[in-house]
């Protein structure tokens, strides 16, 4: 993959994370996970399991209403 494709994937994944964070942060963790997975699938990007777990934990921690959306560190075009 090219750096440009990887960067585009990270940007697309970040938009999904921001959308899920803003709408679902107070939902149950399973709902957040479902929405994240669906958004990433629709965006055509993939993240590894460790990145997914970290993002879900950070979204779940937003229940304090003082945290910002997590930052995607790594993503790639879905295969």
Image (spheres, grey):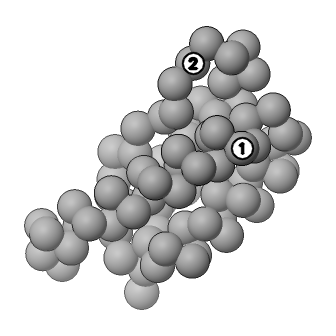
Question: Which quadrant of the figure has residue 41?
Answer: bottom right
Q: Residue furthest right?
A: 28
Element type at mark 2: loop
* Residue found farthest to the left: 3
> Is 34 displayed left or right of 74 in the figure?
right
Q: Which residue is mark 1?
A: 23
Residue shown at the point (26%, 66%) measured from the top left: 8
Q: Report the side of 9 relative to 20 (left or right).
A: left
The location of residue 78, given as percent across then percent down, is: 43, 80
* Label 1 Cα neighbours within 10 Å, binned few <14 / some 14-19 / many ≥20: few
| Quarter occupied by the C terminus | bottom left
Residue 50 visible to the viewer: no
Tag 1's secondary structure? helix
Residue at point 55% right, 67% down?
40
Q: Is residue 77 visible?
A: yes
Q: Of 53 and 21, which appears nearest the observer?
A: 21
Q: Earlier in the sequence, mark 1 or mark 2?
A: 1
Whole-percent x, y for residue 4 in the image = 13, 69
Tell me the mark number nearer the camera, choosing from 1 and 2.
Answer: 1
Residue 67 is marked as 2
CA separation in Å, label 1 and label 2? 14 Å
Q: Is residue 54 above or below residue 19?
A: above
Residue at x-position 73% and y-position 35%: 25
**Quadrant of the rendering where the N terminus is positioned:** bottom left
Tag on residue 36? Answer: none
């Amino acid at each position: 993959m090219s750096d440009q494709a990887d960067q585009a994937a990270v940007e697309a994944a970040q938009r999904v994370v921001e959308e899920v964070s803003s709408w679902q942060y107070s939902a149950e963790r399973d709902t957040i996970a479902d929405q994240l997975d669906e958004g990433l699938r629709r965006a055509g990007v993939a993240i590894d399991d460790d990145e997914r777990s970290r993002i879900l934990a950070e979204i779940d921690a937003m229940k304090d209403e003082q945290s910002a959306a997590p930052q995607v560190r790594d993503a790639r075009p879905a295969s």
